[in-house]
Amino acid sequence: MKSPTSENLPEAISQIIDSFQGEISFAAKNLTTGARLDFHPRRHVSTASVIKLPVLVHVLMMASEGKISLGQSLILKADDKVPGSGVLYLFDPDLKLSVRDACNLMIAVSDNTATNLILDQVGLESVNQRMRSLGLKVTEIFARVFRPNPNPTPRNRRYGLGVTTPAELVDLLERLATHRLADEETSRLAMEFLDHQHYRDGIPRRLPKGYKFAGKSGAVDHLRSDVGVVTTSSGEMIAMAIFATKMRTVLWSPDNPGLIVIAELAAALTRQLEKGRIRRGPSKGS
């Protein structure tokens, strides 16, 4: 049975949503035409590693303001290493890497240790203040990865590493892709980092040949997420943020149902939005 909001979407997208055993939230916007499609775009969702995108934005904006250097050296210590995604936990202590290196690892392979090295330099609250200054009122990081939360509350216990909404992330992506974040060079550099994303089992998985994707994914046991910008063969840019949550199955493989539904939705959203069939898309749900 269709949900009361999915029935207002194009049939192909509605069917994907209604067949998924979990909860779907997304926002998608054609940055060339302004056309958009949304499904619960303002729902508060756990970020998982997608929160590393706001961390990257903050670091690059700090660099543009002269408050940090991307060439600044960071030293990996034994007690800096944390498990999960990434490769730095495999390296010997006293490795020297730059802030730029750490940002590349944080985005390209979602390196948790690299993320914490960066957060040790800039601080959690400065990331959150930056997001608020950009108008992202919900998006927030609560703790370093695989480290105790310094200020546990019922809210951050619920969302884990961070919280956001699909709509806020699409707004942030639009600023990056259209070079309206800080200066043009900062926006361009951010998109360059996102273009190096190694994990391709979500949004880009079923895009047509020749289409490009730059973005950041996230995963925990019962959640998969992917956010980024699709560039079509004709050069149209479509920003999207898709979250598949409350999944019954814990499956750490490309066959995860969350990854599959994200891929299906991304392909369907791209087909709909690039053809200009949706002139404007008021948000569906909240």
Image (cartoon, rainbow, N blue to C red):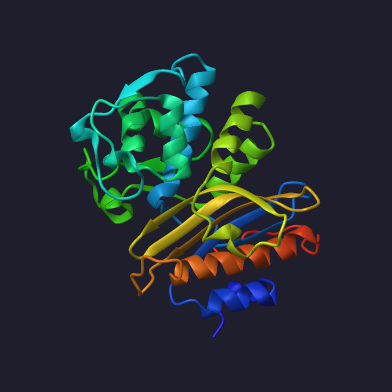
For this view, does 46 lie left or right of residue 199? left
Quadrant occupied by the N terminus? bottom right
For this view, does 129 lie left or right of residue 190? left
Q: In the rendering, at what x and y percent does residue 73 appear?
A: 37, 19
Residue 143 appears in the picture as rendered:
no
Q: Residue at x 54, y 42 (%)?
A: 196
Question: Where is residue 270, by image quadrant?
Answer: bottom right
- The outermost residue toward the top is 66
For this view, does 27 lie left or right of residue 99? right
In the rendered view, would you say 9 is above or below 207? below
Question: Where is residue 76, by image quadrant?
Answer: top left
Residue 113 appears in the picture as rendered:
yes
Question: Toward the viewer: 30 or 203?
Answer: 203
Q: Residue at x 20, y 43 (%)?
A: 148
Q: In the rendering, at what x and y percent does residue 172 appear?
A: 57, 40
Q: In the rendering, at what x and y percent does residue 174 appear?
A: 64, 42
Q: In the rendering, at what x and y percent does residue 37 appear?
A: 66, 60
Total marks in image: 0
Q: Residue at x 47, y 57 (%)?
A: 225
- The outermost residue toward the bottom is 1
- The outermost residue toward the front is 92
Q: Residue at x 28, y 37 (%)?
A: 91
For this view, does 89 lie left or right of residue 109? left
Question: Toward the viewer: 153 or 50?
Answer: 50
In the rendered view, would you say 98 is above or below 36? above
